[in-house]
Amino acid sequence: MTDFGIRKTLALPYDQAIERATAILKDNGFGVLTTIDMKEKLKEKLGVDFKRYVILGACNPTLAFKALEAEPEIGLLLPCNVIVYETGESTSVVSAIDPATMVAVVPGNKAVAKVAADAKARLTKAIEEM
């Protein structure tokens, strides 16, 4: 756990870590809506080399719907980002945003806080399963 994320180091090469993260997120009700390859984008846009690093935009449709019903502007914080990056030839890190951190910008909305707590529990479970 970091100050704003749920983190785990995996004894898996990068490509396998992405596959595992995607599968376990799915098992926990999250689909991956977007995939941003930061190594590729940074090379394309800035001409710089960066380690292999991907941002997965994960969404649980039921939770997203509940959150949007409670606060339409919450869409600014969706989807939940999950990152995977290479730390060695056979090790990677997977980390998910802590939804409680994200919704701190809407204090006092108990419905949103409840959805965030549910999302955090599900993401924590997923990260622990990896």
Image (cartoon, helix red, strand yellow):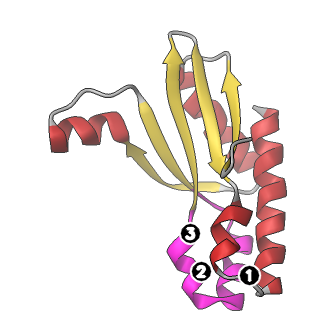
State if disc 2 and disc 3 touch (CB < 8 Å): yes
Where residue 96 appears, as percent x and y from the top left, is 65, 47
Q: Which residue in the structure is indicated by mark 2? A: 74
Where residue 94 appears, as percent x and y from the top left, is 62, 35
Which disc is residue 66 wearing? 1
Above or below: residue 68 compared with residue 9: below
Tell me the quarter of the picture where residue 8 sits: top right
- The boundaries of the magenta stretch are 58-79
Q: Earlier in the sequence, mark 3 or mark 1?
A: 1
Name the dominant secondary structure of the magenta segment: helix
Q: Residues within 10 Å of mark 2 (few under 14, many from 20)?
A: some
Q: Which residue in the structure is indicated by mark 3? A: 78
* Left or right placement of residue 47 versus residue 128 in this view: left
Residue in the image at 50% along x and 23% along y: 86
State if disc 1 and disc 2 touch (CB < 8 Å): no
Residue in the image at 83% along x and 45% along y: 125
